Amino acid sequence: MNNPAVTITICRTCRPAGDEQPDPPGAALSRATVAKVAESNVARSVQVYEIACLSACTRACSATVSGRGKFSYVIGGLTPDDASDLVAFAEAHAASADGIPPWRARPERIRKNTIARLPPHGTPHPLVEQPSAATTPEEAS
Amino acid sequence: MNNPAVTITICRTCRPAGDEQPDPPGAALSRATVAKVAESNVARSVQVYEIACLSACTRACSATVSGRGKFSYVIGGLTPDDASDLVAFAEAHAASADGIPPWRARPERIRKNTIARLPPHGTPHPLVEQPSAATTPEEAS
């Protein structure tokens, strides 16, 4: 495995509830994303992978975007038509220092379908704080 | 930041829709989790952090569990009463080689409220595959 700046991992088995196409939309999204990366200038920095399940089945199709020492994103509700937006988001993720792209750099489809963002393990970030367990507030009355 | 085996990051601002307590349930979950870790044997391997938002607001309260080179998990629908289960899951995550604890080692509340699992960036795993873009299937008819 090489070490690209950004990894997109797409659930290749993802299909929305009721979908019965022989080819899962997740697989089609993966192919469309691979093609989009290949035809763009981001092929060196963005690597696409597939996985059989991201445990986000209720929000199919789903994908993750991550990079070393950066925040990761989980995005759901995607269709094969969203490959361009997914790659544009990955590009913005690669360009960001901490994996949190500026709001305006995130395609609307990605903004509206973000399921979660995860802080990197073992890399400090201003948003991630030690709990102040000693200052437990009084129980809310 | 030290380098524990597992990081639990809890959204301290999380509150389910309609909740109007002055103390967000997310903050209470964080305090309960810190206390649970402190009283258990996992304090060396599990570190708890807080964050202002995990972008999983529709599934409050939410938390992530991650470790270096391992799968990460996002869990939602949590309450302060779930601190024990969250710590038990983190312990199982720490004990697993790849961050995917055996099904039976995952508390039921965690299993039922898993929002997503994310593969590690830059670490190969049998579940993560290169897409076979050359073998595009025929369009489903």
Image (tube, coloured by chain):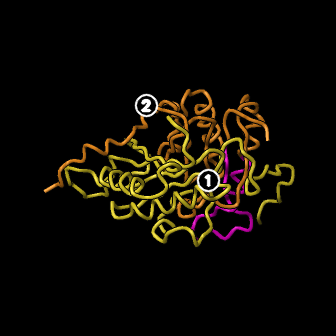
Chain colours: A orange, B yellow
Taking the image as shown, residue A26 lies to the left or right of residue A112, namely right
Residue A29: image x %, image y %? 68, 52
What amino acid is at disc 2?
Pro
Residue B110, position in %: x, y? 48, 65
Q: Which SS class for mark 1?
A: loop
Whether residues under marks 2 and 1 lie with C-beta atoms below 8 angstroms apart, the answer is no
Question: Could you say which quadrant of the image residue A129 lies in?
Answer: top left
Work out whether residue A23 or residue B118 is closer to the camera in this orientation and state it.
B118
Q: Which mark is residue A92?
A: none
Q: Measuring from the top left, give residue A99's x and y in whole percent.
A: 55, 34
Question: Is-magenta flag for residue A21?
Answer: yes
- The residue singled out by tag 2 in the image is A126
Chain letter of disc 1 in the image: A
Q: Nearer the viewer, mark 2 or mark 1?
A: 2
Left/right placement of residue A131 relative to residue A7 reads: left
Q: Give the extent of the magenta segment.
A: A8-32
Mark 2 → mark 1, Cα distance in angstroms: 34 Å
Residue B122 included in the magenta stretch of the image: no
Residue at 43% across, 31% down = A126
Work out which quarter of the rendered image holds the C terminus of chain A and state it: bottom left
State whether discs 2 and 1 lie on one chain: yes
Report the residue at 52% width, 57% height from top.
B90
Question: Under tag 2, what secondary structure?
Answer: loop
Q: Of the residues under marks 2 and 1, which one precedes in the sequence?
A: 1
**For mark 1, what is the residue?**
A79
Of the residues shown, which amino acid type is indicated by label 1? Thr
Picture coordinates of residue A135, whole percent (x, y) = 25, 43
Quarter of the picture containing the N terminus of chain A is top right
In this rendered view, identify the residue nearer to me: A41 or B35.
Answer: B35
> Mark 1: few, some, or many residues within 10 Å (few <14, many ≥20)?
some
